[in-house]
Image (cartoon, helix red, strand yellow):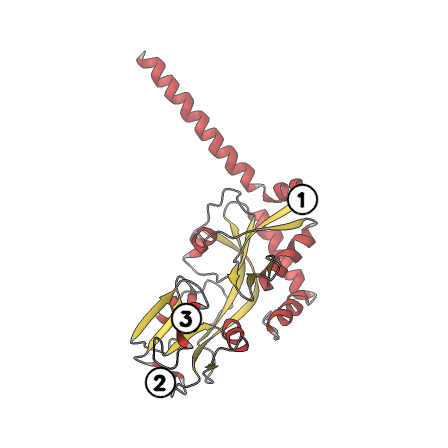
Amino acid sequence: MRRTCRLDRLAVLVLVLGLAFGGLARAADTIGRVRSRGVLVVATNAGWEPQGFLDDAGHLAGFDIDVAREIARRLGVKAAFRTPDWGLMTGGHWYGRWDMMVGSATPTKARAQVVDFAGVYYYSPYVFVVNTTSTIRKRADLDGRKIGVETGTTSEDYIRRHLEIDDPGAPPVAYSVTPGQVRTYANSMMPFDDLRLKAGVRLDAVLAPEQTALHAIRAGYPLRVLPDGYAFREPLTVVTDKGDPAWTARIRAIIAGMRADGTLRRITIKWYGKDYSR
């Protein structure tokens, strides 16, 4: 009986390992999987206008959505979207649940441990924003103040002084503000909701992408961008899971083609009114 039990356990272990490695092998053939079903499954955001959001008809729209659909078109397939939590999208080990992420993710050294970066498709300058009633006029006035940021993002990494962008072309990060207090928020618009309540009521300033800040201002928020330059400028990349370099290379080639023929420029101008593709 003891020998039989050992063999049974060994058989189960072999079966489990076979299934696991078989699943990984199938997941690694991403190109074949996408072509066979005719659909590119993309992880993205649904609550970050204008990058990705639900329009009045309840359909996904936005800059990232247009980019993903164009990548799918160049692959000869249609795009379908999933909207998992940010941590799941950037945490890797997707096991084929989606084929890539187009969600305005920054290539950082921490993320490079668990996912691959398939190509920068645009750049986002980060700015400090204050209420129009604020007496703050320049970045130096922000020392000791209450700064709001979206949690788990590069704005939080920057304000806490541990941002590490993993891109050879990115300039070194220079820190210029020492906040008195950092307040974090669950999404990109919540800091602006607090900042609109007059200067200093809940926040003195927000650090955010220029695109998000200008969107809030166009939406009627009583805010202004501090004029003394960008805090930093980050590349945004398409993300793929580790384990399929051929797939990552295929997506990188498509993104390079979209930049070369002006497609990325056209899409950024459509959604932002400005070329952020270079």
Disc ID at residue 141: 2
Residue 253 showing in the rendered view: yes
11 over 133 or under it: above or below = above
Q: Earlier in the sequence, mark 1 or mark 2?
A: 1
User: Do labels 2 and 3 touch, CB within 8 Å?
Assistant: no
**Relative side of 276 to 155, left or right:** right
Name the quarter where the N terminus is drawn: top left
227 over 181 or under it: above or below = below
Residue 162 showing in the rendered view: no
Question: Looking at the picture, which amino acid does disc 2 mark?
Answer: Asp
Q: Quadrant of residue 101?
A: bottom right
Q: Which residue is mark 3?
A: 191
Q: Quadrant of residue 276?
A: bottom right
Question: Looking at the picture, which amino acid does disc 3 mark?
Answer: Pro
Q: Earlier in the sequence, mark 1 or mark 3?
A: 1
Which structural element holds mark 1?
A: loop
* Identity of the residue drawn at 41% across and 86% down: 133
* Identity of the residue drawn at 36% across and 84% down: 140
- In 3D space, how far apart are the residues under numbered discs 1 and 3 (Cα atoms)? 40 Å
Residue 112 locus on image (x, y percent)? 45, 55
The one nearer the camera, 105 or 162, is 105
- In 3D space, how far apart are the residues under numbered discs 1 and 2 (Cα atoms)? 54 Å
Q: Give the number of the mark in front: 1 or 3.
A: 3
Which structural element holds mark 3?
A: helix
**Relative side of 122 to 183, left or right:** right
Residue 76 locus on image (x, y percent)? 70, 49
Q: Which residue is mark 1?
A: 38
- In 3D space, how far apart are the residues under numbered discs 2 and 3 (Cα atoms)? 19 Å
Q: Residues within 10 Å of mark 1 (few under 14, many from 20)?
A: some
Q: Earlier in the sequence, mark 2 or mark 3?
A: 2
Residue 146 locus on image (x, y percent)? 33, 76
Question: Looking at the picture, which amino acid does disc 1 mark?
Answer: Gly
